[in-house]
Image (tube, rainbow, N blue to C red):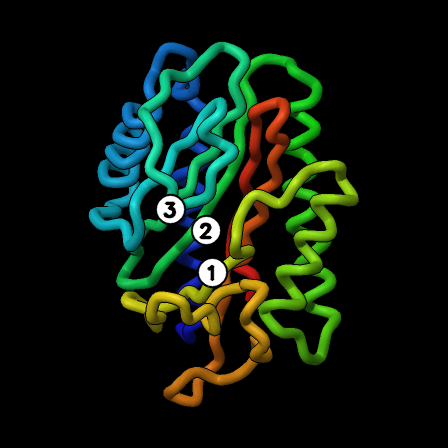
Amino acid sequence: MNIVENLIKAEKIASLLFDEITKNDFLIAGKTEQQLSDELCEIAHSKYGIEKHWHKRLVRSGANTLFPYYAELPNLTIEKDDIIFFDFGPLIDKWEADFGRSFVLGNDPLKHKLKQDIEEAWYRTKDWFDGQTSVSGAELYQYAFNLAKEYNWEFGGEIAGHLIGEFPHEKVEKGNYNLYIHPENHNDMRLLDKNEKQRHWILEIHFIDREKQIGGFFEQLLC
């Protein structure tokens, strides 16, 4: 299989793993974020043979959903009406997957709207990207940022995605955003890598409402 086929295969397995979240009362109030993370990691190992993750496993609930990936936060207990998001990066046959989804407990209409909006915004952003012959990381970030405003949310992250590939993928130095979907990345995202091969990207959408103390997250393979 070629690189794209391997990345798609890894993502499909990650998607199956996330399907487990909706089964067997996995998502219930009273568990902690760390407990949910550990339980999903055990399922990943026992059902899909996943032993390693290329980045830290992330489960965020309640007010923690406001914060981006690198924030260090307290381990919250899931409440009965929470919105929760998961960000996992399993390694599958040495290929990196990066998959993020949000889930809502209860019937709060605003939280369900947030979940729907981030999913819709992800696909709108991909459609826009696919329609461009040339687009920089900064331009793609700005498009996602503007969509958050259109949906009456705030964009929650300093990036809207990053490189993905065979582990370990290209690394960047601190302060160098050329391999991120970031306002300071003015390079064409379709530039070849240092080995003259196509780069592949993850797109992540993180919308938040600071006043309501909620956020939602959706990410998967862009190209």
Sequence-earlier tag: 3 or 1: 1
Circles 3 and 2 in contact, beta carbons < 8 Å: no
Label placed on residue 70: 3
Sequence-earlier tag: 3 or 2: 2
The local secondary structure at tag 1 comes to: helix
> How many C-alpha atoms fall within 10 Å of the one at disc 1: few (<14), some, or many (≥20)?
some
Residue located at (54% from left, 63% from top): 182
Q: Amino acid at mark 1?
A: Ile
* Front residue (pair 70, 197): 70
Residue located at (22% from left, 50% from top): 52
> How many C-alpha atoms fall within 10 Å of the one at disc 2: few (<14), some, or many (≥20)?
some
Residue located at (48% from left, 80% from top): 198
The local secondary structure at tag 3 comes to: loop
* Front residue (pair 14, 222): 222
> How many C-alpha atoms fall within 10 Å of the one at disc 3: few (<14), some, or many (≥20)?
few
Circles 2 and 1 in contact, beta carbons < 8 Å: yes
Label placed on residue 25: none
Residue located at (28% from left, 23% from top): 35
Rendering coords of residue 105 (x, y %)? 54, 17
Q: Is residue 53 above or below residue 153?
A: below
The residue tagged 1 is 8
Label placed on residue 12: 2
Can you tell which of label 3 and label 2 is closer to the viewer?
A: 3
